[in-house]
Structure formats: structure tokens, C-alpha cells
Amino acid sequence: MSDKRLLRSFMAGILASVMAAGASAQSPESAEDWLRWSQEARSQHSFVAEFIYQHQDHVDTMRIWRSAHPDAGVQERLFSLSGEPREIIRDHEEVTCVLPSAQAVMVDRRHWQAPLDARLPDSLSDHEPHYRGRVIGEDRVAGRPTQRVAILAEDAMRYGYQLWFDQETGLLMRAELVSSEGDVLERVMMLDMELRDGLEPTELMSQLPQEGFKRVTARATPSADDQPIDASSWSVADLPDGFQLHMEREQALPGRDQAARHLLFSDGIATVSIYIEAETPDERMRGALRMGAMNVYTTTMDGYQVVALGEVPSSTVERMATSLQRADSTSNASH
């Protein structure tokens, strides 16, 4: 072999090694890398897909249209393919739920009704010591190669997550909410996915009739000119480590004549809502209830009905509900 051919072969080998090293450096390695890539991916890829949502023995099949546009942001329409027809429309500002069986349209702020892939953190270090991440291994979902990643809960106050990310795009393809005993409490899994360059505007518009439906809009805490149901501030005295109050507002609920006070707590991944409304003798409730991954605890205090709920263990919602207090009652007690 001539010197020139040897040199070309040598340089080609070096170039291939450099390119391979560069590709390896760019591909996610840690759980935090996969989470960060997934957060970027959801704002870059448009698609149409079908998925299942499973909780306890109940399985729903849904179809989703998701548009990721540099100007309009992420917009979604979800439509049920099983059970009663229902539809969810999401954009960067709000989420709209069309419920024909209740003849109602519910509108809420998107930030507190975001899908799981939008709520996942891009940095697990911010959530230590309550969570830690681990890369499990490769798998396949909807015929596509995926990487499985675990977010492990480090205490009994929250659940863990098993996540499957698409190796080509970084999109979340499957997610499971897991108890400390390893039981799967809730599962969302893609059945197929068609990547699109973009979606038509009509594909993101509601297709269900809404004539005559009651429109229920949740609104933020009223201004000084409004009269909320209760002007007192509420707090949780025994708040689990890592959880913080993220919102307090007045919220209208379907089928209720009076608005409820809504407090929302989060540890950055899991959320717990507490609803407070005036107690009525015929609707007095107390005790625990489980609906799939959702745990609920109800109690009464000072003439109010308190309902705490969230995708957290039952001990967490009970602890928060039973330690709820009003600021004015606390100050009065100290005098």
C-alpha cells in the first residue's frame, strides 16, 4: 500500500473516531439528560397518535393531535375512542374539557392541568433528596426503540415514575406511576405515533357539539372588588417536606351553586389539591377514598367541608387535610 493510501486510511479512521465520539457525547446518558431532552422534544415535534390510559381495572383509549409550532407553542386536542365521548383542548394558556354527558364545558388554566410530560422536571438535582433518577435499559413502545428511565421516590410521601423515551425524538412514549411496593397505579402508553411536519388548524379545534352546554370557568383569586367565599387565608400546618403552596384561588365546580376555595401544593412533580367549601348537613363527608392512582381524603372543620386529593399516597392527602388551618383562627387562638 502506498504512503498516500496509508495516510488516507489513517485519517479516515481518526475522522470516524471523532464523529463517533461526538455522537456519543450528544446522546443522553443519565436520567437527567433524558429528562432534559424530553422537555426540548415536546416543543419540537408534531404528531398524531393513539394511546391507552389505564387506572385500576379501567382502560381508556384516546387519540391525540399535538402541534409544536415555534410561534403558537404546543397545542393539543385529545378525543376519547372508548366509553363516553369527551374531548380536551389544550394550548399554552388554558385547558378546555368538553363533557357531553354532563352537558358542560370546563375551562381552566393550563399550568395546573398540564400533561405528565410537561410536568416532568429537566433537573432532578432540584428535587433531591425527595427523588432520584436511574437509567434502566432499552425497550420498545409502539414499535419504536425507547430508553427506560426511573424517577424513584425517596420517602413514603410521594410515588415514583417509570418513563419510556423515544430514542429517535426524545418524546415520552410510556409512563407509569408506581407505588413504593412496585405496584403500577396508573399507566399511559402510546399504541402508535405518526410524526408530522405540522397540523391543520381544524385538527386542533373541538369536533363535539356544545350547543346548550353550561360553561364553567375557573378563575384566579378575586380582586379586592370581588367577594370570595371566605376572605381568610388557609395553610397546612403539617406540610410534607418538599411540598409548597403554588396557588390559592376561588373556583367554580360543576353542579355546585357556591364556589370552592382551591389550594394547590406541589413538590415540583407531584401535586395535591385541597378544596374548601361551606359544609352542608346533607353532604357531610369524612374518610378516605381511592380512585386509581388518585387518593382522596375528606374531613370537616369549623363549618367547612375539606377535600384533599392528588396522585400521592393516602397518608399524604390525609396528613395535609387534617392539618389544614385558617390564619384568623390561629391568630385568635393565640390571644
Image: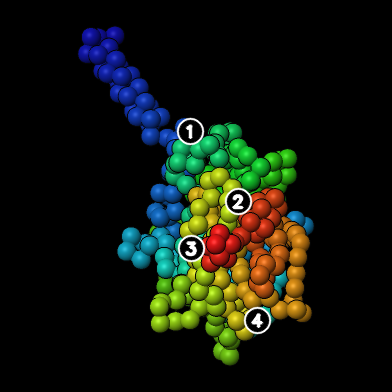
Q: Amino acid at mark 3?
A: Met
Q: Position of residue 136 (x, y in %)?
A: 59, 33
Instruction: Describe the element under mark 2 as helix, strand or loop.
Output: loop
Q: Position of residue 20 (x, y in %)?
A: 38, 27
| Nearer the observer, 219 or 168 | 219
Q: Which mark is residue 292?
A: none
| 1 relative position to 23: left or right | left
- Is the N terminus in the top left, top right, bottom left or bottom right quadrant? top left
Q: Amino acid at mark 4?
A: Gly
Mark 4 or mark 1, which is nearer the start of the sequence? Answer: 1
Q: Amino acid at mark 2?
A: Asp
Residue that mark 1 sits on: 30
Residue that mark 3 sits on: 247
| 16 relative position to 178: left or right | left
Outermost residue to the bottom: 212
Residue that mark 4 sits on: 255
Q: CA distance from mark 1 to mark 4?
A: 47 Å
Residue that mark 2 sits on: 238
- Is the C terminus in the top left, top right, bottom left or bottom right quadrant? bottom right
Q: Amino acid at mark 1?
A: Ser
Callout 1–callout 4 Cβ contact below 8 Å: no
Q: CA distance from mark 1 to mark 2?
A: 34 Å
| 56 relative position to 20: left or right | right
For the point 42% across and 35% down, the residue is: 27
For the point 71% across and 65% down, the residue is: 299
How many neighbours does mark 1 have within 10 angstroms: few (below 14), some (14-19), or many (20 or more)?
few
For the point 47% across and 47% down, the residue is: 121
| 322 relative position to 230: left or right | right
Mark 2 or mark 3, which is nearer the start of the sequence? Answer: 2
Mark 2 or mark 1, which is nearer the start of the sequence? Answer: 1
| Nearer the observer, 287 or 209 | 287
